[in-house]
Image (cartoon, rainbow, N blue to C red):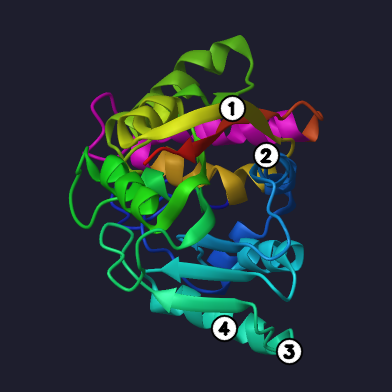
């Protein structure tokens, strides 16, 4: 099998914090994310002439969509701590004729020192709180990010967060591989490869504690329907690699991991591969 896991491999990163480069930009633009992004945009309701912040903007894909909706009289600021991602965003900006209503800034979402308080009509953060924190596992980092977003958002302005609940990922398998799948996914959660894997479930509490009045919360499933997309979105090989590592609490053997991946490939050949990732979208109004 191509890409069989190797217990001695050092390349076991999945959803690595600070991923950059063309491959990651392609991942961010994958069409599987389109349905939940459409729902999020409809709930955020950006209006012509508004000023909007996209926090953790990456390569700026959402920034350009928002800029079209606020029009020439509006303004969209994308902030990211990764210069490589911002360079990709600025390149796209140039390719689109450098629209004047778009701006990109390097910034740490825990300390948005370059942004004044009460600046933005609406603030959007997407799949970024799950990675929040400078080093290690800072359980309070998502709350501190939301506090900063609240600070820079105008009174009665809207804040929206879109985050997965990785503890509820489902991968369809034959019953004989159900236990293996559970062990693989449990290993991923316990190791906190993503720093806050269940933050999607926790958004309502985080909003309320930050002084953001929740207006609505919806869940949109990301449905992965091929093994190829599973490799791209779920990083199946990296999941298996991590499950056999010495860091796993209930590690798989290499044979178990390889058999699991082969089974998923077989499910795909039979037209039965499906995985579901729940995305939580919470939108709230700032109370000051």
**Residue 286 in sight from this viewpoint:** yes
Closest to the observer, 270 or 285: 285
Residue 10 at what x, y percent from top left? 30, 57
- Examine the structure image and report whether residue 258 is included in the region drawn in magenta: yes
Q: Are marks 1 and 2 in contact (CB under 8 Å)?
A: yes
What residue is at 56 percent from the left and 61 percent from the top? 52
Q: Secondary structure at mark 3?
A: loop
Q: Nearer the viewer, mark 4 or mark 3?
A: 3
Name the residue that disc number 3 marks: 97
Return the residue at label 2. Answer: 43
Residue assigned mark 4: 90
Mark 1 vs mark 3, foreground winner is 1
How many labels, in total?
A: 4
Q: Residue at x 53, y 15 (%)?
A: 178
Q: How far apart are the alpha carbons under marks 4 and 2?
A: 27 Å
Nearer-N-terminus badge (3/2) = 2
- Mark 4 to mark 3 CA distance (whole Å): 11 Å
Could you tell me which residue is drawn at 19 percent across and 55 percent down?
Answer: 135
Q: Is mark 3 in CB contact (under 8 Å) with mark 2? A: no
Q: Is residue 164 magenta?
A: no
Asked if residue 206 lies left or right of residue 218, the reply is left
Q: Position of residue 172 (x, y in %)?
A: 64, 21
Query: Residue 16, located in which quarter of the rendered image?
Result: bottom left
The label nearer to you, 1 versus 4, is 1
Query: Quick one: label 1 or label 4, which is nearer the N terminus?
Result: 4
Magenta part of the chain: 242-268
Alpha carbons under labels 1 and 3: distance apart: 36 Å
Q: Counting residues from the N terminus, which is met first, the one under dot 1 or under dot 3?
A: 3
Give the Cα distance between marks 1 and 2: 8 Å
- Residue at numbered disc 1: 216
């Amino acid at each position: 099998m191509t890409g069989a896991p190797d217990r001695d491999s050092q390349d076991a990163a999945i959803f690595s914090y600070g991923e950059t480069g063309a491959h990651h930009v392609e991942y961010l633009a994958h069409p599987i994310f389109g349905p939940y992004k459409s729902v999020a945009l409809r709930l955020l309701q950006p209006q012509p002439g508004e000023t909007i912040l996209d926090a953790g903007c990456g390569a700026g894909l959402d920034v350009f969509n928002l800029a079209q909706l606020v029009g020439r009289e509006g303004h969209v600021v994308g902030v990211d701590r990764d210069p490589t991602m911002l360079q990709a965003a600025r390149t796209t900006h140039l390719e689109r004729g450098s629209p004047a209503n778009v701006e990109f800034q390097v910034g740490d979402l825990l300390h948005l020192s370059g942004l004044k308080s009460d600046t933005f009509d609406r603030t959007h953060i997407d799949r970024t709180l799950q990675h929040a924190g400078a080093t290690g596992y800072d359980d309070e980092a998502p709350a501190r990010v939301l506090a900063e977003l609240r600070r820079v958002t105008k009174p009665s302005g809207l804040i929206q967060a879109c985050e997965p609940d990785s503890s509820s990922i489902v991968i369809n398998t034959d019953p004989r591989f159900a236990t293996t799948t559970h062990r693989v996914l449990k290993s991923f959660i316990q190791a906190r490869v993503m720093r806050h894997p269940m933050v999607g479930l926790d958004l309502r509490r985080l909003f309320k504690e930050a002084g953001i009045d929740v207006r609505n919360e919806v869940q949109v499933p990301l449905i992965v329907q091929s093994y190829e997309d599973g490799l791209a979105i779920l990083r199946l090989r990296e999941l298996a690699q991590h499950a056999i590592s010495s860091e796993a609490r209930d590690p798989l053997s290499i044979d178990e991991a390889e058999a699991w991946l082969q089974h998923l490939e077989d499910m795909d050949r039979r037209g039965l591969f499906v995985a579901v990732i729940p995305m939580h979208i919470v939108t709230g109004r700032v109370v000051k």
